[in-house]
Image: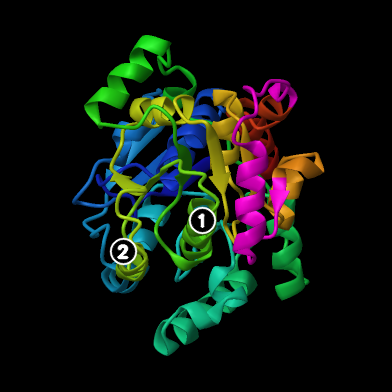
Amino acid sequence: MNIAINACHYNDQEPSGARNRFAGLYSTVIRKATDTQFFVLEPKDSKPNELIIPQKNVQFIKTGLLSNSVIQRHLLGKLTINQILQKNQVHIFDTSYLPLLKYNKGKTLLTIHDLRYVHFPEWYSLPRRWFSQRITTNALKEADAIITVSQTMKNEILKFSAKARVEVVGNALSPEFLNCNTSVEKVQKIKMKYNLPQEYLLTVGHIEKRKNYLNLLKAMLILKKRNINIPLVAVGKRSDDTTQVNNFIKNNKLMNDVRFFYGLTESELACFYKGANLFVFPSIYEGFGMPLLEAMHSTIPFICSDIPVFREIVTGDSNFFNPYKPEEIAKSIEKNIKRNLLTGFNDVLEKYSWEKWAEKYISIMKVL
């Protein structure tokens, strides 16, 4: 069997959950499926091959497409990618970005991480909203099978497109994160390097509306009024919503209480987790929730939004709060800020492993 993996949208910018998934899942799949030939399609301006552990059964092919140009990737990709697929007698084309490039001579497998444009159209401009909803609807109809990252997302997709064939291949921690040195000495070095406070709350996520930064900041104001003064450290990536968040911080005089960090390595991120008093995950909407696994592995106390996908990953009522109510977020922080280190999540972490997800992926390919 010949399988082509579309990596034309990956670039060499700062780390992301999608990059970690690409590296973790496909490196493991390629290693385990020795009877299958894999072709990884690359853009001309970056090197996704550096994310995959080299194996005899994988070949990397430059497409001439640009990783950061959606229009060019789609319009030129329709011709370029289909030619590459046919030339290499590909049976299954695995892609994870929209608009969907349909492979006419074989099966097309589409990975969807979430349906944010469908559920929260008010967060986006009218043209982007219309375009995203249209291409999502078309992709769900055109794909021969769909992979998504959680049972929660599978349920959402089936509500949106009842006839779609949907399978769950979840996420897992990256090997780099799992194997990081987070000794007391290493954590202290990182705290000194970045001038971190000895005690702090941690949150991780791109600065966008679904991450719910504004309500978390409102909770910080409530805590300050109660003389609970512990700074918030946020690790993420800038977006169009960054200005709104920064203005809120400035207007409410939180400049000394909130610090943002960008572009950390996996090793540095692991130390940020290990050095925190409490991890707070206030998202309104997620397809999965990788930071929860990162917090569990780091054995630090954590609290999170009461949303379906987090309930899928975490058990127990004490960890959850209503993300729409800053007062509840503040109350949960106050309640959990002095908790001891957490253990007992090994069964959850073992469930979310690349070895298990690779086996699931291979089984899907065999019957597609």
Residue 116's place in the image compared with 5, above or below, is below
- Viewer-proximal residue among 38 and 241: 241
Quadrant location, the N terminus: top right
Query: Residue placed at 53% from the left, 63% from the top?
Result: 215
Q: Find the distance from the CA under tag 2 to the CA under tag 1.
A: 20 Å
- Residue 65, picture quadrant: bottom left
Query: Of residues 189 and 78, which is closer to you in this image?
Result: 189
Segment colored magenta: 320-347
Name the spot of residue 171 as percent of width and height, x first.
59, 40
Tell me where residue 91 appears, x and y as whole percent. 54, 49
Question: Which kind of residue does numbered mark 1 sit on?
Answer: Lys
| Horizontal side, residue 315 vs residue 193: left or right | right
**Residue 111 at x, y = what percent?**
56, 55
Rendering quarter of residue 15: top left
- The answer to whether residue 343 is magenta is yes
Q: Which label number is shown at residue 246?
A: 2
Residue 225, numbered label: 1
Magenta region includes residue 361: no
Q: Secondary structure at mark 2?
A: helix
Query: Looking at the picture, which amino acid does disc 2 mark?
Result: Asn
The relative height of residue 292 versus residue 34 in the rendered view (above or below) is below
- Asked if residue 367 shows in the view, the reply is no
